[in-house]
Amino acid sequence: MYKAPVEEIAFTLKHVAGMERAMEEGVLGDLSTDLVDAILSEAGRFAGEEVEPLAENGDKQGARLADGKVVLPDGWEKLYRDWIAGGWNGLTAPEEFGGQGLPHMLNIATLEMWNSASMAFGLAPTLTMGAVEALRAHGSGDLKKTYLAKLVSGEWTGTMNLTEPHAGSDVGALRSRAERRDDGTYRIFGQKIFITWGDHEAAENIIHLVLARLPDAPAGTRGISLFLVPKFLVNEDGSLGARNDLFVHSLEHKLGIHGSPTCTMIYGDGKYGAEKGAVGWLVGEENKGLACMFTMMNNARLAVGIQGVAIAEAATQKAIAYARERTQGRAPGTAVSGMSPIIEHPDVARMLLTMKALTQGARAICYACAQAIDMSHRDPERAKYWQERAALLTPIAKSFSTDAGVDAASLGIQVHGGMGFIEETGAARLLRDARIAPIYEGTNGIQAIDLVTRKLTIGNGNHVRGVIAELREIADSVAKSNLEGFGETTPRLQAAIADLEKTSEWLLSKQAEGAVAEALAGATPYQRLFGLVLTGSYLAKGGLADAGEGAKRIALCRFAAENLLAETAALSDRVIAGASSLEAARAALA
């Protein structure tokens, strides 16, 4: 059974991500340590006692389409309503619309818990929170007045409609169309696929944010507009009116996240209403919809990253519990007769520690990204710095963390042995759920392209150089601490940081020369290289901070430095030396 690691989450927020310092400086308003601990404790209780017990049933039953309606697994509608009754949906939303105005760091921490307990359930609020951000940033006053309070409370849920069957990740190729009406509304026509929580009965209304193209729009991404399209039209007094002209055509039969309804949506088919066309309202400006949607997408990318952390945490807990109970063989040096718990075997311990290091490293990366987002809004004097930091960390948080989720879930099955391949243990479900996260909200390959071509080059590379300097300070602090428990952490971390610096400069130089293809050939290994260096550095920072668990934290940091960081040299070589071999080997794909 999953138990939220409340103390570990609180420690990472306060001492690694920077929340404690921000509270001391007054940047986070009246937020106190006691309030943070209370929120995290209650979230952990709800996740473990209310959400997790329904996860297995959600996986087995799945969402289903019956008589044109999406039916959630047994108990999920009540679970969702209990969840919004707790105020969790509006944790960071603006107070003027009923939210609590708390830091994004706290929301990301609670999202980790919901997703560890059930990733399929945690997806519903993830999309709604993104819709709130997009509408808050780009919606008109009337749209905010009509929709925000209900979205903030969670009484209405939100979706993001980008993907179409022929377009995939190429949003510029979408064909959904919008037609203007004299009353200021638009009529939306088209098909969207892979729409998470696109329909259900847990909420009174569902607010779809839909990308579509106007008849006179420019080609490609420059001609995309964003529209708000509700399932039910809203009357002037705020009550629900007629059904809008949209419906669910089918549900996807997926590898995992079975409880989450992934819908194919049809807009404007004439099924509902006197006139064909789903009624929509423009969000932002015509032909500038992709920029508006990116507000939601960036929010979602970090949220997906935390899904990777969540699965890694759940898989690690399950594997450790199993390894303590399962006996097999005799571990080296065992004096007691009989079989040993498998956790005492070196190879099993190695797998478990790898899972734990990846989990805690990915968590720190995601929380640091959330902190940068918070500070960009709350620290006006350094807003540009924090915006750049959030921009840089977002693709790493999304990609490294979701890869870590898959790796940890796979290792968890290995620890379970044959029992891990059996559905009853629950280890297989975690791997099935985890596998979507490196794909949606921009595949991890797309995140790598973004990192190398847009984020690495911020300020001509100077922001990355600043990050590298900060990481060197952490390595120097480890050396100055003279704590024996760190072992070879300092030289291993210094070498990894040097790999990151060398590789970053090579990628910058290649792009300056116009050799973008060479740079992109190594984008994915560079992304992992960056994530591993951050993992080693943040684990070291946690070990130095010491909150009563210093010896354990330092030991885990040493394990990561001496067992995982050696990979950075090979990754650097792949980036720098691998481009020419990639091009030469293309013939093998013919």
Image (cartoon, grey):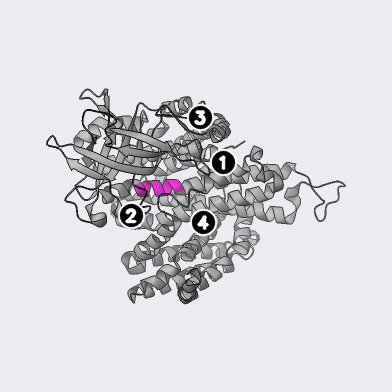
Q: CA distance from mark 4 to mark 3?
A: 39 Å
Q: Residue furthest left?
A: 182
Identify the residue position indicated by label 2 in the image. 387
Q: Is mark 4 in CB contact (under 8 Å) with mark 3?
A: no
**Which numbered circle lies on residue 538?**
4
- Residue 198 at least partly seen: no
Residue 140 in the image: x percent, y percent? Answer: 20, 39
Identify the residue position indicated by label 3 in the image. 73
Q: Residues within 10 Å of mark 4 (few under 14, many from 20)?
A: many
If you read the primary sequence from the N terminus, does the residue marked by circle 4 or circle 2 appear first? Answer: 2
Residue 307 in the image: x percent, y percent? Answer: 49, 45
Considering only vertical position in the picture, is 305 above or below 83? below
Q: Is mark 4 in CB contact (under 8 Å) with mark 2?
A: no
Q: Secondary structure at mark 3?
A: loop
Magenta segment, prevailing SS (helix, strand or loop): helix
Q: Is residue 165 left or right of residue 273?
A: right
Amino acid type, residue under disc 3 in the picture: Pro
Q: Secondary structure at mark 2?
A: helix
Residue 299 forms part of the magenta stretch: yes
Q: Secondary structure at mark 4?
A: helix
Residue 123 in the image: x percent, y percent? Answer: 44, 39
**Which numbered circle lies on residue 5?**
1
If you read the primary sequence from the N terminus, does the residue marked by circle 3 or circle 2 appear first? Answer: 3
Question: Quick one: 460 or 73, which is closer to the camera?
Answer: 73
If you read the primary sequence from the N terminus, does the residue marked by circle 4 or circle 1 appear first? Answer: 1
Instruction: Report the magenta residues as a range.
Output: 297-304
